[in-house]
Amino acid sequence: MPIPRTKLEYRECAGSLSAVDDALYVIGGKWKLKIIIALSEGSQRFNELQRKVTGISARVLSNELKDLEMNGFVTRTVHEEASPIIIEYKATDYTDSLQDVLKALTAWGKMHRSKIKTEAEHNKHKAIH
């Protein structure tokens, strides 16, 4: 976004930044999108989910799931009739609203990785000659 020059442009820019802040607050961080992507395969128990999201601790996963549930991205179902009690987590239909975001992030991530690799190769050859 270009540098705002008028009060109206400043308000529009501030509004955009505020919206980005809101989005990053809800889905930002190291784990939330990874959890949402893992849950896109269907409902899962806590331990299954922890195995799929490599490197996440149980405490962090628990906190992230609570945040995602609070923001409407995940449902938590307790099956008390089972012994031991089974708790399943499932992505809600609201996660579908992130599809365009995920596609854009995936495309950008691939482009960025390619750019970095190309630059590293270029610098490697440049250093040799």
Image (cartoon, helix red, strand yellow):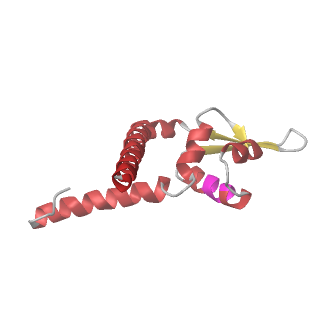
Residue located 64% across and 59% down the image = 63
62 up-or-down from 6: above or below: above
Depth order, front residue of 51/22: 51
Q: Main secondary structure of the magenta part?
A: helix
Is residue 13 shown left or right of residue 8? right
- The spot of residue 22 in percent (x, y) is 40, 58
Task: Specify the farthest residue to the top.
Answer: 41
Q: Quarter holding the N terminus?
A: bottom left
The residue positioned 55% from the left and 51% from the top of the image is 32
Residue extending furthest toward the left: 6
Region of the chain picked out in magenta, as a range: 61-66
In the drawing, does residue 17 fall left or right of residue 5? right
> Where does the image place residue 16, in percent across and percent down from the top left?
27, 57
Q: Position of residue 110 (x, y in %)?
A: 42, 40
Classify residue 101 by image quadrant: top left
Residue 42 position by quadrant: top right
Q: Which is more toward the observer, 16 or 52?
A: 52
From the top left corner, tell me how far across and down residue 56 is, in percent. Answer: 67, 55
